[in-house]
């Protein structure tokens, strides 16, 4: 018998031994007659855990929103926090980029839970940005397991150096046109029309990496995929190989980038586009509102997803933390002020 088989058997035995932990913890006083509770089957599965997700900060980050979200997450106490990218504005020189990263790092430094980084186009579009990411945070795409659940973190800006240089120039031109002629004019530019702007890019090397990860982790009870741009929308992409491997297993995919919430199913699996956690509003694109997402994974393949609007997360005094009562968390509410 292999070491992995022995370990799996020990784990299974341990979980069986804990299956009634909730009932054993519940110790009511003597009650004669009918019971003033429904049952004693507590939702205390030892395999259950909850993590949080935050969305884009960029595209015109609004002051204090993200700091408020972090204070609210401290009340919610997830086991860890992960993003969908666009953590900084980017586009500057090395010193400016370092300053932006130090600002983000400082805002998450006090979190009692781990914070896992996911990259966006504002974070790793240029060669300089990617080089700096590597120096500070290591790999741009990676994976991890937590309680037999597999997490895939993709890089949606994974293209050749030549194409990257070309796109950076086109993007700068589009930004100038946006400033002088408006958003609609910017969409007609080469960058605005590029496939990479909408659905990003995945290299063959990255696809190879995740196909192997999925093969090596076929026993995971659920798989979560985090990526900034919706790479599955590309008409032709190496991501198709990742998706082909994923389709035989339960998985959930999250992306950001658009700053408007959207829910779709693809291959019968949930694909969720998050809105913002302090980034710019784009109400014409849909629900543009600040939120965090809580994901609870139960035994086997039980996944519950709750979107919590920042305007509704209050502390024990009834106030929004970080003096958040004075802030505006939705495009509609901001327009009315």
Image (spheres, grey):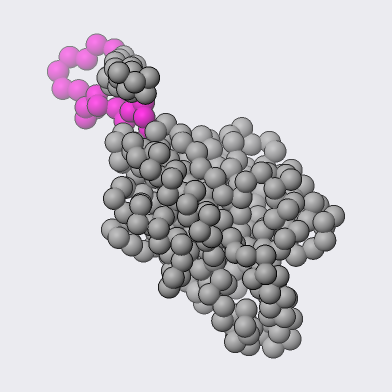
Residue drawn at point x = 40 percent, y = 45 percent: 214
Residue drawn at point x = 42 percent, y = 31 percent: 147
Residue 93: percent from left, percent from top = 82, 61
| Quadrant in which the C terminus appears | bottom right
Question: Would residue 182 be visible to someone looking at this image?
Answer: yes
Q: Residue furthest left?
A: 33
Residue 47: percent from left, percent from top = 36, 29
Specify start and end residues of the magenta stretch as a single range: 29-48
The reply, left or right, for residue 135 in relation to residue 263 is: right
The reply, left or right, for residue 4 in relation to residue 160 is: left
Residue drawn at point x = 53 percent, y = 75 percent: 195
Q: Quadrant of residue 332?
A: bottom right
On whether residue 206 falls in the magenta region, the answer is no
Q: Is residue 174 above or below residue 329?
A: below
Q: Is residue 38 above or below residue 81?
A: above
User: Relative to the observer, which residue lies in front, 27 or 295?
Assistant: 295
């Amino acid at each position: 018998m292999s070491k992995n088989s022995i370990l799996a058997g020990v784990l299974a035995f341990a979980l069986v031994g804990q299956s009634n932990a909730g009932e054993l913890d519940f110790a009511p006083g003597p009650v004669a007659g009918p019971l003033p509770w429904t049952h004693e089957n507590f939702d205390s599965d030892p395999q259950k855990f909850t993590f949080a997700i935050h969305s884009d900060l960029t595209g015109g980050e609004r002051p204090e929103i993200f700091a408020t979200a972090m204070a609210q997450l401290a009340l919610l106490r997830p086991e860890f926090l992960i993003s969908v990218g666009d953590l900084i504005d980017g586009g500057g020189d090395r010193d400016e980029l370092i300053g932006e990263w130090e600002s983000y790092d400082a805002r998450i430094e006090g979190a009692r839970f781990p914070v896992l980084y996911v990259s966006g186009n504002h974070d790793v579009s240029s060669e300089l940005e990617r080089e700096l990411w590597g120096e500070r945070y290591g790999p741009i795409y990676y994976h991890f397991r937590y309680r037999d659940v597999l997490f895939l973190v993709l890089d949606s800006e994974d293209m050749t150096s030549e194409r990257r240089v070309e796109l950076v120039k086109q993007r700068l031109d589009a930004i100038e046109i946006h400033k002088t002629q408006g958003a609609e004019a910017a969409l007609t530019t080469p960058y605005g029309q590029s496939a990479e702007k909408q659905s990003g890019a995945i290299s063959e090397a990255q696809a190879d990496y995740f196909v192997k990860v999925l093969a090596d982790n076929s026993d995971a009870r659920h798989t979560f995929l985090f990526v900034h741009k919706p790479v599955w929308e590309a008409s032709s992409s190496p991501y198709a190989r990742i998706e082909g491997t994923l389709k035989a297993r339960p998985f959930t995919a999250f992306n950001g980038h658009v700053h408007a919430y959207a829910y779709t199913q693809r291959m019968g699996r949930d694909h969720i586009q998050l809105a913002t956690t302090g980034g710019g509003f784009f109400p014409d694109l849909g629900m543009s509102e600040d939120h965090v997402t809580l994901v609870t994974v139960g035994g086997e393949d039980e996944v519950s997803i709750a979107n919590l609007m920042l305007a509704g997360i209050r502390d024990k005094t009834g106030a929004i933390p970080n003096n958040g009562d004075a802030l505006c968390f939705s495009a509609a509410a901001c327009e009315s002020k």
